[in-house]
Each structure stands twice: as structure tokens, then as C-alpha cells.
Image (cartoon, rainbow, N blue to C red):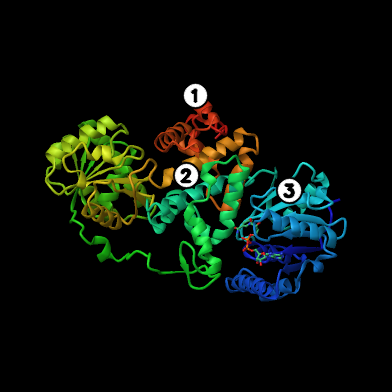
Amino acid sequence: MAREFSTVGVVGLGTMGAGIVEVFARNGIDVVAVEISEPALERGRVTLTGSTDRAVAKGKLAPEDRDALLDRVHFAVGLDALHSVDLVIEAVPEHLDLKQRIFAELDRVCRPETILATNTSSLSVTEISVATTRPNQVIGIHFFNPAPVMKLVEVVRTVVTAPEVVADVEALCARLGKVDVTINDRAGFIANALLFGYLNHAVGMFESHYATREDIDAAMKLGCGLPMGPLALMDLIGLDTAYEILDTMYRRGGRDRRHAPVPLLKQMVTAGLLGRKSGRGFYTYERPGSPVVVPDEATPLATEAALADGARAIAKVGVVGSGTMATGIIEVFAKAGYEVISVTRGAEKSAKVCEAVKTSLNKGVVRGKLAEADRDAALGRISWSATLDHLADVDLVVEAVVEELSVKKALFASLDEICKPGVVLATTTSSLPVIDVAMATHRPADVVGLHFFNPAPIMPLVELVRTIRTSPETTATARAVCAALGKTGVVCGDRSGFIVNALLFPYLNDAVKMLEASYSTADDIDHAMKLGCGYPMGPFELLDVVGLDVSLAIQRELYLELREPGFAPAPLLEHLVTAGYLGRKTRRGFRDHSHR
Ligand SMILES: NC(=O)c1ccc[n+]([C@@H]2O[C@H](COP(=O)([O-])OP(=O)(O)OC[C@H]3O[C@@H](n4cnc5c(N)ncnc54)[C@H](O)[C@@H]3O)[C@@H](O)[C@H]2O)c1
């Protein structure tokens, strides 16, 4: 029989604690909510009522249920109020000495059978537990932010946690409607170990002016379908908490440089820019605690006029190539009203591309997303050619040929000879340096990267890669073109992986390393990222879709360019590729897809 928890205590009512109180009270459990001082207690109360009022306003909670929920919460200053609870969850700031002091005190105040849990994200549960005389009743219960919304709970057992305590806590998670994964005590557990290297890397990109905060966040939202961008997420987590988590993970997790907090973080914390809770972090918020972002001095002027400032007029576009990307890009431009010349290496290839574009447009018609007349007009705007000479009078060329530097360089040298002056020359490369292609011409100022995502007609993101020789005029033109295509163009520097792949693939590689180390299973890791962080797919699901060979190649490029030891491809990934397990396309990758 699982233990009954009728009253629980929560210590610390900040970002996490207030949410945890709500989770318990919503599920009919009485809560003693404890803070260090009256003002802090009042802040916690305001957070809780604010959150429940919002749930009522959204129709997710009946007013009488809210009142019942709030009646279940007893607020108090000081730990003494916890003398008769069945379980305590501690959610005070991420400092080991503070947590140890609180656990020693809880050990004294609480009944001998009370379970003592910490919500720590990165500290050692074992080290916290030894501050008590009951380490076998100490456990980690790691909720995700916002606790009432996120389904995942990581249950962290130490080597001395009693098995029945683990079972009781797992049963409790089920009662709260949460999905739990039970794991051992390791820095960052599953989700944060995979998340924080990525978040810190994104802060580094921002700090080095590689891209703007808006563009970094838009890239990850639109390119990967994440619920929020990394910098907005840092603001939600709280920069002080994020700093402490990174610092602890760096020290506990093998001194991986990727976890050494980016210097800007420390400066922001010292300056009191803590994120949403203080009203300002990477973004500025309406007021402390508000999720509403307001414009500040760093907000870009997103008006059409500002976007088009200095841009050249583009009416006629050449698309070179006959693969998946070229086909999608032809469709995108033709639908947006541009006159398009498709250039392939022969009539046969042109006929195939033409067929593929027609099929895709017809699908749009069948699905009711495109009128027949618009389909016909789009097709009417495309002309088909097998010679580059027809690109003499276009205003923009988009190259989407095979991903080989020598081929692309030769093509750009030809375009340089054929195209009229002032043309913008764009490459869709996803891994080669744009500057190498630019220098194959005598007009590197006019060359830019336009990295479309697959499938181009659907994916809303384009990475706009500016080399050190790209002119502001060319960048402005590329921006204006993206806007006219109805895409979000994010501007970034010319580094391996641009924004999306540079942030995505090391995380996927880390997940493989975690699996390889037998810390957890592919299923639990996928669960953790989907339910704890709101990712649309877990890392192993995504790797199988992208292809393990493609993923390995990208990861190798990143490693070679940045020489970051943490980016070295996971040996397991290399072995699977060698074994021919490439993912869905070969019916086997991390999972067996043969039955589907
Ligand atoms: N922020 C996140 O996204 C997140 C997610 C999961 C877990 N966590 C973990 O949860 C814990 C709390 O983090 P947070 O972001 O909520 O921090 P926070 O700074 O928002 O809140 C901490 C609260 O603890 C209170 N406090 C400090 N000393 C206390 C004491 N002696 N007694 C009682 N209350 C005290 C503070 O007044 C404050 O309200 C940390 O261990 C953190 O790693 C955070």
C-alpha cells in the first residue's frame, strides 16, 4: 500500500515553489507554504493567486474550485509550521549550503517518518541528504517550470534512498497527473543536462553579437518547433537560478566548458537583471513577474519601410538545382508572385522538377489552401531552362545544388560571368562557409546565404547568412525578399551550423552520449524533453527522422570548426552509422521502424 500524503509542505515560494503549491492544492492535498519573511510570503501568495486567477479567466478552473484550492493552502513564515506534514518539498535558491542548512532544520522540525524532498536542478541530492539523520528518506522531486503546466517530474534517488520512498513518491506523481522518470543522482539529471549546454551556447551567441535575441529565439521556435526560444526561456527560468545551475553542472559534471556560465550571465545577475521575475532580463517585461514583453532600446524596427531600407528591387529570380530544396524554393518564389527561371542540368531534370512543383501545388489545391487560379498563375510565372545563360537578367539567384564546395564554387564563378551587375547571389548551403563561395566571384559584397528549411513551402524560417564581405544593401535585400515570401528571416554570422544546427545538434549528440553512458533509456530521455521542456519530438525520435548519417556529418563539421571537445561526435552515433542504421530511411536507427 502506497503511503497517503494528506498534507505537504513547500519551502520557498519563488518561481518554482509557488507553482508546486498550486499543483498539490489543485489535486486536493493540503499545503503548508513557507517562506523566509513576511514580504517574501506575500509575494508567493500574489504569485499563486495571480496564476489561479489567470486559470479562471481562461476558463480552465471554476471560480469555486479556485476558492477551494486557495483554502487548502496555509501560509507561514519559518520552518516550524511544517511539524506535522507528510512530505516537504524544498524550492529555495540553488545553493548547497543553504539547502543543507534547511534540511538539517527540517530534520529537527518534521516527524521522523516525513519524506524530505528537494526540487534542486543540479545540486547533489546525496550531499543534501547527509545534512539530515534520515538520508534514506531524502529524495529529489524535480518539477519543471511552470510546474502546473509541465507534465514531467524527475524523481531522483540516491544510493541510500529507501525503495519504498521512491515507490511512494512515484505513486504521488501519478496522483498529481504527472509523468515521472526515476533516475540516479547526477548533475542536471536528464532534462537540464541536455538543456543547459544549449541555453548557455545561445547566450554566448547573443553575447558575441552573432545574432540578435529576437533572431536567436525565432530561429529555434520556427526552425525546431520549440515552445519558446532559449533567451526567452532563460528569462523564464531566472538568470540567477540558471547561473547557479550552470556553475554547479560545470563543477559536478566533469568541467565541460560548455557549462561554464557565459560571462554576460554573471554581469546580468549582478546588475539585477534576473529575467521575468525582476521585469528585465534578455527582454524587458511589462512589470516584474509579467510574461508580457514590452519594446526596449534593443527592439528592432520591424516596419516594412525599415526592412526595405537600402534594399534593391527584385522581380525576377533564378533558382539553380533540381533537388528537394530547389523544387521547394521554386514553388515558394512563384507563389509569392516572383517571375522564376529554374535552371537544371538538362531537359529531363527540368521535367522532373516541373512535375514535382505541379504535384506540390496541386496538393495545396486539394487541401483548400490554394485556389486553382493561383496555382495556374504560379506555374505560369516559372520558366524552365538547362543553361545558366538565361540568368543574365535576373535580380536574384538562389543556388541549391549538391552540397560540395568545388561544385558550388564553380557555379558561382560562372554566375559571376553571366549575371548583370547588382544581382544578389544566394547560396542555400547548410554547412559550407558562405565566404568560400563568395570569394569564387569578383563581387563578394553581393553574396549572401539563404538557408531555407525542408520542406521549404511549409517551414517559416530562413537563416540569412551574412559574411564579413556581404554589403548592408545585400542583407537588406535578402531581408526584404524573406518578408515578401512570408518567411521569417533571421540574420546570423557565417559560422558552421548558423543558428539552428549549431544549437540543435550538440544537444542531440549529448542525448546519444547520455544513452551510451546508460544513465537513462531512449524512451525516458525522449519523454523528459517532450514533457519537461515542451519539445515536439524527443532527441531520438528527431535523430531517426533527420537521419543519423546527416546528423553525424553536421556534428563533425561543428566539431572541426569550433574544436570544442564537448562537440566530439558520440561514438555510439558513429557506430550506428557504420552499421547502416541511419534512422527511418533505413527502417532502423535508435528505434526499429520495420513494422511501420
Ligand atoms: N526556475 C526554474 O525554472 C527551475 C526549474 C526546476 C527546478 N528549479 C529549482 O528550484 C529551486 C528554486 O528555484 P527558483 O527558480 O524557484 O528560485 P527563486 O529565487 O525564484 O525562489 C526561491 C525562493 O526561496 C525563498 N527562500 C530563500 N531562503 C529561504 C529560506 N531559508 N526559507 C524559506 N524560503 C526561502 C526566497 O525568498 C524565494 O522566494 C532551485 O533549487 C532551482 O534549481 C528551478
- In the image, what residue type sits under mark 3? Glu
Q: Is residue 136 visible?
A: yes
Is the residue marked 2 within 8 Å of ligand 1, measured from its CB? Answer: no
Residue appearing at x 55%, y 29% in the figure = 572
Give x and y (percent) for residue 114.
84, 57
Q: Dot 1 corresponds to which residue?
A: 578
Q: Dot 2 corresponds to which residue?
A: 504
Total marks drawn? Answer: 3
Q: Dot 3 corresponds to which residue?
A: 127
Q: Which of these two is toward me, 285 or 414?
A: 285
Give x and y (percent) for residue 101.
75, 58
Q: Is residue 62 visible?
A: no
Classify residue 479 by image quadrant: bottom left
SS label for mark 2: helix
Alpha carbon separation for disc pair 1 and 2: 22 Å
- In the image, what residue type sits under mark 2? Leu
Q: Is residue 11 above or below residue 381?
A: below
